[in-house]
Amino acid sequence: MLAYERVGTGEPLVLLHGLSHRRQGWYPVLDRLTERREVVLVDLPGHGESPELGPGAPAEAMLKEIRLLLDHLGLDRPHVAGNSLGGRLALELAAQGAARSATVFSPAGFWNSGAEFAYTRSLFQVVTALAARLETRSERLIATKAGRALAFGWIHARPHTALPELALGDFQGLLRALPTVERFIKEREPLRATVSRDVPVTIAWGWYDLVLPLYQSSVARRRFPHARHFRLPGCGHVPMVDDPALVSRLLLRGSDPVR
Protein backbone atom coordinates (compact mmCIF):
# COMPACT_ATOMS: atom_id res chain seq x y z
CA MET A 1 0.00 0.00 0.00
CA LEU A 2 1.22 3.49 -0.81
CA ALA A 3 2.34 5.69 2.08
CA TYR A 4 -0.04 8.55 2.79
CA GLU A 5 -1.22 11.13 5.31
CA ARG A 6 -4.87 12.06 5.82
CA VAL A 7 -5.65 15.31 7.64
CA GLY A 8 -8.30 18.01 7.76
CA THR A 9 -12.05 18.17 7.25
CA GLY A 10 -14.30 18.87 4.30
CA GLU A 11 -14.36 17.74 0.68
CA PRO A 12 -11.61 15.15 0.08
CA LEU A 13 -8.62 16.45 -1.89
CA VAL A 14 -5.85 14.04 -2.94
CA LEU A 15 -2.44 15.62 -3.63
CA LEU A 16 0.10 13.90 -5.92
CA HIS A 17 3.72 15.07 -6.11
CA GLY A 18 6.04 15.07 -9.09
CA LEU A 19 8.80 12.78 -10.29
CA SER A 20 11.68 12.57 -7.73
CA HIS A 21 9.68 14.42 -5.06
CA ARG A 22 7.65 13.19 -2.05
CA ARG A 23 4.37 13.92 -0.29
CA GLN A 24 6.00 16.44 2.06
CA GLY A 25 6.47 18.69 -0.94
CA TRP A 26 2.90 19.87 -0.24
CA TYR A 27 3.62 20.84 3.37
CA PRO A 28 4.05 24.56 2.56
CA VAL A 29 0.36 24.74 1.57
CA LEU A 30 -1.10 22.16 3.93
CA ASP A 31 -2.16 24.43 6.80
CA ARG A 32 -4.05 26.66 4.37
CA LEU A 33 -6.10 23.70 3.14
CA THR A 34 -7.01 21.55 6.12
CA GLU A 35 -9.71 23.78 7.61
CA ARG A 36 -11.72 23.42 4.39
CA ARG A 37 -10.57 20.13 2.88
CA GLU A 38 -9.81 16.61 3.99
CA VAL A 39 -6.37 16.37 2.46
CA VAL A 40 -4.70 13.10 1.46
CA LEU A 41 -0.97 13.39 0.76
CA VAL A 42 0.40 10.43 -1.18
CA ASP A 43 3.92 9.12 -1.82
CA LEU A 44 3.92 7.79 -5.37
CA PRO A 45 5.37 4.31 -5.96
CA GLY A 46 9.15 4.31 -5.76
CA HIS A 47 9.11 7.61 -3.87
CA GLY A 48 9.18 8.65 -0.23
CA GLU A 49 8.02 5.79 1.99
CA SER A 50 6.04 3.91 -0.65
CA PRO A 51 7.02 0.52 -2.10
CA GLU A 52 8.91 0.28 -5.36
CA LEU A 53 7.07 0.75 -8.63
CA GLY A 54 5.76 -2.52 -10.06
CA PRO A 55 6.38 -3.90 -13.57
CA GLY A 56 4.77 -2.57 -16.71
CA ALA A 57 4.38 0.88 -18.20
CA PRO A 58 5.34 3.27 -15.38
CA ALA A 59 2.38 5.66 -15.58
CA GLU A 60 -0.14 2.83 -15.85
CA ALA A 61 1.43 1.03 -12.89
CA MET A 62 1.24 4.21 -10.81
CA LEU A 63 -2.39 4.84 -11.73
CA LYS A 64 -3.28 1.31 -10.68
CA GLU A 65 -1.64 1.77 -7.27
CA ILE A 66 -3.30 5.15 -6.73
CA ARG A 67 -6.74 3.75 -7.52
CA LEU A 68 -6.13 0.85 -5.13
CA LEU A 69 -5.29 3.38 -2.42
CA LEU A 70 -8.42 5.43 -3.14
CA ASP A 71 -10.52 2.27 -2.84
CA HIS A 72 -8.76 1.35 0.41
CA LEU A 73 -9.53 4.80 1.83
CA GLY A 74 -13.14 4.67 0.67
CA LEU A 75 -12.73 7.71 -1.55
CA ASP A 76 -15.17 7.69 -4.45
CA ARG A 77 -14.18 10.30 -7.04
CA PRO A 78 -12.32 12.71 -4.75
CA HIS A 79 -10.90 15.98 -5.97
CA VAL A 80 -7.36 15.32 -7.18
CA ALA A 81 -4.48 17.74 -7.63
CA GLY A 82 -0.93 17.18 -8.78
CA ASN A 83 2.35 18.73 -9.77
CA SER A 84 4.42 17.65 -12.79
CA LEU A 85 4.07 13.84 -13.06
CA GLY A 86 1.43 14.07 -10.33
CA GLY A 87 -0.45 16.55 -12.50
CA ARG A 88 -0.42 14.15 -15.41
CA LEU A 89 -1.68 11.37 -13.16
CA ALA A 90 -4.45 13.65 -11.85
CA LEU A 91 -5.60 14.36 -15.40
CA GLU A 92 -5.47 10.64 -16.21
CA LEU A 93 -7.64 9.91 -13.16
CA ALA A 94 -10.10 12.59 -14.25
CA ALA A 95 -10.19 11.09 -17.75
CA GLN A 96 -10.98 7.68 -16.22
CA GLY A 97 -13.88 9.15 -14.26
CA ALA A 98 -12.06 8.59 -10.95
CA ALA A 99 -11.76 12.28 -9.96
CA ARG A 100 -14.40 14.90 -9.24
CA SER A 101 -12.03 17.66 -10.34
CA ALA A 102 -8.39 18.02 -11.34
CA THR A 103 -6.13 20.93 -10.39
CA VAL A 104 -2.67 20.59 -11.84
CA PHE A 105 0.58 22.55 -11.73
CA SER A 106 2.96 22.19 -14.70
CA PRO A 107 1.57 18.76 -15.62
CA ALA A 108 3.82 16.43 -17.57
CA GLY A 109 2.87 15.29 -21.06
CA PHE A 110 2.42 18.50 -23.06
CA TRP A 111 5.61 18.45 -25.09
CA ASN A 112 5.15 18.49 -28.86
CA SER A 113 7.80 15.96 -29.81
CA GLY A 114 10.41 13.54 -28.58
CA ALA A 115 13.03 16.18 -29.29
CA GLU A 116 11.34 18.59 -26.88
CA PHE A 117 11.15 15.91 -24.20
CA ALA A 118 14.85 15.21 -24.72
CA TYR A 119 15.57 18.53 -23.01
CA THR A 120 13.67 17.47 -19.88
CA ARG A 121 15.31 14.05 -19.93
CA SER A 122 18.77 15.62 -20.16
CA LEU A 123 17.98 17.97 -17.28
CA PHE A 124 16.96 15.07 -15.04
CA GLN A 125 20.09 13.16 -16.00
CA VAL A 126 22.32 16.10 -15.07
CA VAL A 127 20.48 16.78 -11.80
CA THR A 128 20.43 13.15 -10.65
CA ALA A 129 24.13 12.70 -11.46
CA LEU A 130 24.98 15.86 -9.51
CA ALA A 131 22.80 14.80 -6.57
CA ALA A 132 24.54 11.44 -6.37
CA ARG A 133 27.94 13.16 -6.24
CA LEU A 134 26.80 15.58 -3.53
CA GLU A 135 25.15 12.96 -1.31
CA THR A 136 27.88 12.84 1.32
CA ARG A 137 27.89 16.65 1.63
CA SER A 138 24.14 17.15 1.45
CA GLU A 139 23.55 18.13 5.09
CA ARG A 140 26.11 20.93 5.03
CA LEU A 141 24.98 22.00 1.56
CA ILE A 142 21.26 22.23 2.31
CA ALA A 143 21.87 24.07 5.60
CA THR A 144 22.83 27.20 3.65
CA LYS A 145 20.70 29.41 1.39
CA ALA A 146 23.36 29.19 -1.33
CA GLY A 147 23.35 25.40 -1.06
CA ARG A 148 19.57 25.24 -1.35
CA ALA A 149 19.77 27.50 -4.39
CA LEU A 150 22.29 25.12 -5.98
CA ALA A 151 20.29 21.99 -5.14
CA PHE A 152 16.80 23.27 -5.95
CA GLY A 153 17.18 26.19 -8.33
CA TRP A 154 16.07 23.88 -11.13
CA ILE A 155 12.59 23.42 -9.61
CA HIS A 156 12.03 26.51 -7.44
CA ALA A 157 12.22 30.17 -8.37
CA ARG A 158 12.88 30.99 -4.70
CA PRO A 159 14.79 27.94 -3.40
CA HIS A 160 16.38 29.91 -0.56
CA THR A 161 12.95 30.25 1.11
CA ALA A 162 12.58 26.48 1.57
CA LEU A 163 12.87 25.27 5.15
CA PRO A 164 16.24 23.49 5.54
CA GLU A 165 14.78 20.35 7.16
CA LEU A 166 12.17 19.93 4.41
CA ALA A 167 14.74 20.69 1.72
CA LEU A 168 17.12 18.06 3.09
CA GLY A 169 14.30 15.52 3.08
CA ASP A 170 13.50 16.44 -0.52
CA PHE A 171 17.15 15.95 -1.49
CA GLN A 172 17.23 12.55 0.19
CA GLY A 173 13.90 11.74 -1.46
CA LEU A 174 15.41 12.45 -4.86
CA LEU A 175 18.21 9.98 -4.18
CA ARG A 176 15.74 7.34 -3.02
CA ALA A 177 13.63 7.80 -6.18
CA LEU A 178 16.51 7.45 -8.67
CA PRO A 179 15.49 3.99 -10.02
CA THR A 180 11.95 5.23 -10.67
CA VAL A 181 13.23 8.45 -12.24
CA GLU A 182 15.38 6.42 -14.62
CA ARG A 183 12.36 4.39 -15.72
CA PHE A 184 10.23 7.44 -16.36
CA ILE A 185 12.73 9.52 -18.28
CA LYS A 186 12.99 6.72 -20.82
CA GLU A 187 9.35 7.37 -21.71
CA ARG A 188 8.44 10.19 -24.06
CA GLU A 189 4.76 9.63 -24.76
CA PRO A 190 2.73 12.84 -24.48
CA LEU A 191 -0.51 12.94 -22.55
CA ARG A 192 -3.35 11.76 -24.77
CA ALA A 193 -6.18 11.60 -22.23
CA THR A 194 -9.29 13.70 -22.65
CA VAL A 195 -11.44 14.80 -19.74
CA SER A 196 -15.20 15.19 -19.86
CA ARG A 197 -16.46 18.78 -19.78
CA ASP A 198 -18.43 17.79 -16.69
CA VAL A 199 -15.18 17.46 -14.72
CA PRO A 200 -13.69 20.84 -13.71
CA VAL A 201 -10.03 21.15 -14.70
CA THR A 202 -7.59 23.85 -13.60
CA ILE A 203 -4.12 24.04 -15.18
CA ALA A 204 -1.47 26.39 -13.80
CA TRP A 205 2.11 26.93 -14.95
CA GLY A 206 5.05 28.70 -13.32
CA TRP A 207 6.56 31.57 -15.29
CA TYR A 208 10.06 30.31 -14.49
CA ASP A 209 9.54 26.59 -15.03
CA LEU A 210 12.87 25.13 -16.14
CA VAL A 211 11.72 21.49 -16.22
CA LEU A 212 8.60 21.73 -18.40
CA PRO A 213 9.00 25.18 -19.96
CA LEU A 214 6.18 27.71 -20.00
CA TYR A 215 5.48 27.32 -23.72
CA GLN A 216 3.98 23.93 -22.93
CA SER A 217 1.12 25.76 -21.22
CA SER A 218 0.01 26.85 -24.71
CA VAL A 219 -0.15 23.21 -25.74
CA ALA A 220 -2.26 22.52 -22.64
CA ARG A 221 -4.63 25.35 -23.60
CA ARG A 222 -5.17 23.80 -27.01
CA ARG A 223 -5.63 20.31 -25.60
CA PHE A 224 -7.93 21.43 -22.77
CA PRO A 225 -9.80 24.50 -24.08
CA HIS A 226 -12.55 24.18 -21.46
CA ALA A 227 -10.14 24.17 -18.51
CA ARG A 228 -9.26 27.24 -16.47
CA HIS A 229 -5.69 28.22 -17.21
CA PHE A 230 -3.35 30.30 -15.08
CA ARG A 231 0.27 31.40 -15.21
CA LEU A 232 2.02 31.76 -11.89
CA PRO A 233 4.29 34.83 -11.62
CA GLY A 234 7.44 34.31 -9.60
CA CYS A 235 7.07 30.53 -9.57
CA GLY A 236 9.16 27.67 -10.88
CA HIS A 237 8.28 24.07 -11.68
CA VAL A 238 7.34 23.20 -8.08
CA PRO A 239 5.41 26.32 -6.98
CA MET A 240 4.39 25.27 -3.46
CA VAL A 241 7.60 26.74 -2.01
CA ASP A 242 7.62 29.82 -4.26
CA ASP A 243 4.09 31.08 -3.53
CA PRO A 244 2.15 28.96 -1.01
CA ALA A 245 -0.71 31.46 -0.79
CA LEU A 246 -1.36 31.50 -4.54
CA VAL A 247 -1.08 27.71 -4.88
CA SER A 248 -3.46 27.23 -1.94
CA ARG A 249 -6.05 29.57 -3.47
CA LEU A 250 -5.97 27.66 -6.74
CA LEU A 251 -6.25 24.32 -4.95
CA LEU A 252 -9.28 25.49 -2.96
CA ARG A 253 -10.89 27.12 -5.98
CA GLY A 254 -10.23 24.12 -8.21
CA SER A 255 -11.76 21.73 -5.66
CA ASP A 256 -14.70 23.95 -4.77
CA PRO A 257 -17.78 21.70 -4.41
CA VAL A 258 -20.09 24.57 -5.46
CA ARG A 259 -19.65 25.44 -9.13
Image (cartoon, rainbow, N blue to C red):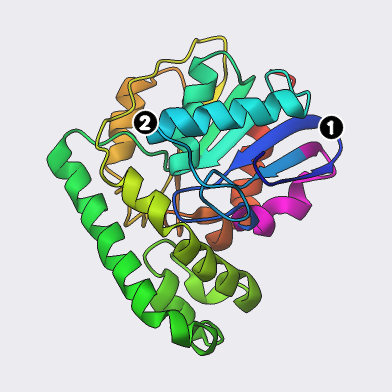
Q: Main secondary structure of the magenta part?
A: helix
Q: Position of residue 93 (x, y in %)?
A: 53, 23
Residue at image point 48% right, 69% down: 158
Q: Position of residue 75 (x, y in %)?
A: 75, 24
| Callout 2 secondary element | loop
Start-end of magenta stretch: 25-38
Residue at image point 68% right, 57% down: 27
Q: Residue 6 occupies which quadrant of the picture?
A: top right
Furthest residue to the left? Answer: 115
| Callout 1 secondary element | loop
Residue at image point 57% right, 31% down: 65
Hey, what amino acid is under mark 2? Ala
Image quarter of the N terminus: top right
Q: Is residue 38 rendered to the left or right of residue 173?
A: right
Q: CA distance from mark 1 to mark 2?
A: 34 Å
Q: Is residue 88 visible?
A: yes
Q: Position of residue 92 (x, y in %)?
A: 47, 24
Residue 10 — which label?
1
Q: Is residue 163 above or below residue 81?
A: below
Furthest residue to the front? Answer: 55
Q: Earlier in the sequence, mark 1 or mark 2?
A: 1
Hey, what amino acid is under mark 1? Gly
Numbered disc total: 2
- Which residue matches tag 2? 57
